[in-house]
Amino acid sequence: MREVRRQDRLLREQWEAARGQVRQWVGVGDGERRVLAQLLVVSPRGWRLLVGRARSGGVLLVGPGGVFVVGIGLGVVDEVRDEDAAGLLAATKVTESAVASLGMSPVAVQPVMVLAGQSLDRGLGRIRVLGEQEVGRVLLAQPRRLRAESVRAIADHLERVLPDREGVELEQRTVPAPQPDPDGLFDLEGLREAALEGARRAPIEQWMTFLHPDQVALVRRNWAGPARISGPAGTGKTVVALHRAAHLARRTTGRILYVTFANNLPRVQSTFLRTMAPAVADRVDFRSLHSWAQEFLQGRGVPVRLSGDKAETAFSRAWTHVGRESRLAQIDPGHGYWREEIDYVIKGRGLTRFEEYAVVARRRRKASLHRTHRQAVWELYEEYEARRHERGVHDFNDVLSMALAEASKEDGPTPYAAVIVDEVQDLTLVGVRLLHALVGDAPNGLLLVGDGQQTVYPGGFRLTDAGIDIRGDRGQVLRTNYRNSKQILDAALAVVADDAFEDLDGERTPGRRDVDLTYHDGDVVRVAELTVDAHDRELVGALKALPDGALADTALLCASKWALGHYQRLLARAEIPVCQLEQYDGNPVDAVKLGTYRRAKGLEFKNVFLPRYDAESAVGTPGTDTARERAELRRSQLFVAMTRARDLLWLGSVTGPSAPQD
């Protein structure tokens, strides 16, 4: 209560001082004076004001909440004139360019129109329209993007590069003359509550505000057609993609589709965007590819009868009928490899005739198939399709193929101004063609983000196979790792050092790539025990030894769902809280994030625990091409899991005879 009274008294004194100060400014009307006084009141709380030297033309504010370009409207109704809105957006664009050289993302520069004599809070496109009463409270309630030293540096920089602006601050010793006029719309209670809450807020993640200047350039770049951003793990590809989505949402009137393969990522990415750019978050649709395709088909009136279980049954019976005794069993007796062949090579590439399959390059597939083998695969495919049709069901590939057929029809405008594809290497060729069909080759229409080394699914393609031509500077490679220390990155690269890979542009790339490192504090802890029980005791002990609150940024990742079940039960017995990655939405929760290597794609954590990371399960006949292919894919998945770690990578091994885990 004492703090509340202190804040009330302080704010009242500052309000009186601010009113007295702005009365001395000539050429400023009463309504504008009141708004400027509201803005001056926030300056003692870490904000810097830059006003026109003639005390007109709006205000720039730099503070803990970012950079705000403020226009002042003096009308008697709660409307913003078109010319005022255009002028404010033009000033915002100038400010964005001015701070880009400092690495500040465009999402941290926000246009605000304050209407004198009004009380309101609404959006007008990119502009936030506030009443005189609301502006101080809204500024103080902003998430903390900038530290005090950053506020000073940015404000000083803007004052240098914008010579028509000069900094002003509240002169607390100003003694205002007694005035009979009322306080206007000064909101003492709202300001006090915002000030108290602001002191309790945790700082926002720095990557939501600052990028490397080269990354900022990619966020703001105009591309003449489809573009791609690639680069090794930890180089900030997803961060750039999220900022690009916010930038495009501000620059266009249409909706933005941000799509990825995994079902859990859209929830997390949507949370991040809403945190860093709330004004445009509702204009970006975050979806997994298959869920979006199903909704798209339903909107077009196309029936979808998706049933993964029934489709799997259809394939199992097709394998029993025509595959198990065929020449395919000589190459790999398990049906899993041949299901992948159909999913990723035949249906994933949209092949409908054997003549196409007979000559197609089976990228990232190591088993050599002669024509007779391909004929046997095609026979298995046709048997599977017949049994699937008998059951009247679709599989996931069917959904994408049907959506592509619908999207390719020229029967109306595209539903999206732009499409951003994250982790593009995990998609099938049909999936990429589908997303390309939504926007075509329009400028700034399609952005593909991903890295071939982080592929966690079999099969592959080149962008040229999808009819996507990325020329000149429309293919950008990021080369600076902002996440991993040298120790963590070296441990991860040792896993894939001998696995050269073909990226989506067709270039053969060595497994160990050179990157520049900016983070140096991470560490690798290796634990080797003779038994599973001893290994698990060490794991539980290490988790319980983490500082208070550290579980919120800790993940335990497993290679398989079977192992996931074991560790879920282990942590439950140890009374360690768990949040499944399947349900994780990006909001802080004080629990270990538990999931598979695949589900960790696109995420990062301060602490990553990989129990029994080097356990090898027998898959296929040892020494065969299919076994080598699967081993390489497992190494790629492990590499992805290891590079999620920022501060701690815990690697557990069992060196004694293998034992059941539960």
Image: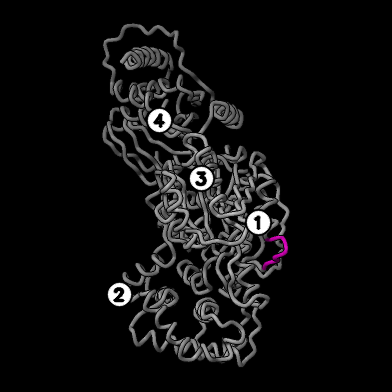
The residue pinned by badge 4 equals: 139
Q: Which mark is residue 301?
A: 2
The earlier-in-sequence mark between 3 and 4 is 4
Q: Which mark is residue 540?
A: 3
Q: Would you say the residues marked 3 and 4 are in contact, meaning their CB atoms lie under 8 Å apart?
A: no
Q: Amino acid at mark 1?
A: Val
The earlier-in-sequence mark between 1 and 3 is 1
Q: Nearer the viewer, mark 3 or mark 4?
A: 3
**Mark 3, residues whose alpha carbon is within 10 Å: few (<14), some, or many (≥20)?**
some
Q: Would you say the residues marked 4 and 2 are in contact, meaning their CB atoms lie under 8 Å apart?
A: no
Residue 599 or residue 225, whichever sits in front: 599
The earlier-in-sequence mark between 1 and 4 is 4
Question: Left or right: 392 with respect to 89?
Answer: left
Q: Amino acid at mark 2?
A: Gly
The residue pinned by badge 1 equals: 477
Q: Amino acid at mark 3?
A: Val
Quarter of the image where one finds residue 309:
bottom left
Q: Residue at x 54, y 87 (%)?
A: 377
Say above or below: 134 vs 371. Answer: above
Please, what secondary structure does the residue beneath circle 2 have? loop
The earlier-in-sequence mark between 1 and 2 is 2
Q: Residue at x 45, y 26 (%)?
A: 56
Q: Would you say the residues marked 1 and 3 are in contact, meaning their CB atoms lie under 8 Å apart?
A: no
Residue 34 or residue 81, whichever sits in front: 34
Q: Tell me the distance, in whole angstroms, between the alpha carbons under discs 4 and 2.
A: 46 Å
